[in-house]
Amino acid sequence: MRRAFQGAAGSRAARMRAMSVTMSQENIRSAPAKRVTLDDVDSAERASRRRGILLMCGALICFATLDATGKWLSQSVPVWEVVWARYVGSTMLALAFMNPWRSPEGFSTRRPALQVLRACLLFGSTAFNFLALRYLQLDETMAILFAMPLVVSLLAGPMLGEWVGPRRLAAIVVGFIGVLIVVRPGLGGMHWAALYCVAGLFCYALYSILTRMLAATDSALTTAFFGSVSGVVLLTPALPWFWTLPPTAGVWLGLAALGALGGFGHYLLIAGHARAPAAVLAPYVYTQIVWMIGLGYLVFGNTPGPYTLIGASVVIASGLYLFYRERATRGDA
């Protein structure tokens, strides 16, 4: 009897649980589905763009510190050693995030040719930048590189299908006039090494366009790894011809810091482009001038000259106008 009672009680408990599950499922089916409104989509898009902007600003702080460190190091060791150390460190950082033995799929890409081209452009931009920093002030190189958003806007038409109108085209022309004010070609104003900056400018603009294109198909870690390893592959075979033993512990530490700053900065840049359009992020490049002027003064005792300030102001105004026209055209809030 006792066993029969327990069995009956167990059966009743099982039936009650089954009825409870059935009623819960019916309630779920009968509950009204939450509608995703246009406001929800717009809010998510704005939040994504804000995260992209914050990531971009973090990347720019890393890049400003990287440039100051590279300029300081070039006073003690060859420039190519500085470039090589920057790539070795960033490659090690990329490998720390991407274990090739645990996740080999992280190294695969759907567009290998584009990844290789982007990596070469990044290498060219880095090499030209460090060569220029050997002779120029931080603020002078940055004033020229400020034209990068203008070049990106100009190249976005044929490469991304984002064509600029006549007003934005006029702003691009004015921006390049600002670059000429800084460089003053033929007037004996700027050091010839400014040509390194101009070459690095176009490399970096193309690199930014390709970064945006690759963000749609490849992960940020994959793109960061391809960009990091390029300098190691290109410079390591020539290492015996330019290597010089760092004279102090501070130089060793600076060479190690280059990789961390470069690798982390470019990861933030890639992640930012994955969350916001290139035209939205481009104007925030101008915040880097604050860090460059400050580091130039604190580390090297440099102050920006009047032509640099005037030219940079013209370039910044042109870039901000491009940003305004982009928002007006797309109706961004």
Image (cartoon, rainbow, N blue to C red):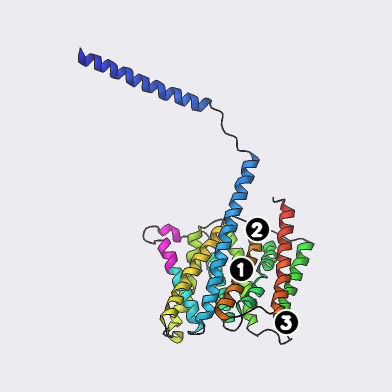
Name the residue that disc number 2 marks.
Answer: 280
Relative depth, front residue between 61 and 162: 61
- The answer to if 101 sits in the magenta stretch is yes
Q: Quadrant of residue 163?
A: bottom right
User: Quadrant of the image for the N terminus?
Assistant: top left
Q: Position of residue 147 (x, y in %)?
A: 68, 70
Quick check: 109 above or below 70? Answer: above
Residue type marked 1: Gln
Over which residues does the magenta segment extend? 92-108
Q: Sequence order check: which comes first, mark 3 or mark 1?
A: 3
Query: How many residues crowd around disc 1 within 10 Å: few (fewer than 14), some, or many (20 or more)?
Result: many
Residue type marked 2: Val
Name the residue that disc number 1 marks.
Answer: 288
Residue in view at x 59 percent, y 60 percent: 213
What distance separates the C-alpha of mark 1 from that of mark 2? 16 Å
Residue in view at x 53 percent, y 69 percent: 119
Secondary structure of the residue carrying numbered label 1: helix
Q: Is residue 126 left or right of residue 243?
A: right
Q: Sequence order check: which comes first, mark 2 or mark 3?
A: 3
Residue in view at x 43 percent, y 57 percent: 105
Task: Return the mark for residue 313.
Answer: none
Secondary structure of the residue carrying numbered label 3: loop
Secondary structure of the residue carrying numbered label 2: helix
Q: Sequence order check: which comes first, mark 1 or mark 2?
A: 2
Name the residue that disc number 3 marks.
Answer: 184
Q: Is residue 329 left or right of residue 116?
A: right
Q: Position of residue 294 (x, y in %)?
A: 59, 73
Q: Quadrant of residue 11?
A: top left
Circle 2/circle 3 CB separation < 8 Å: no
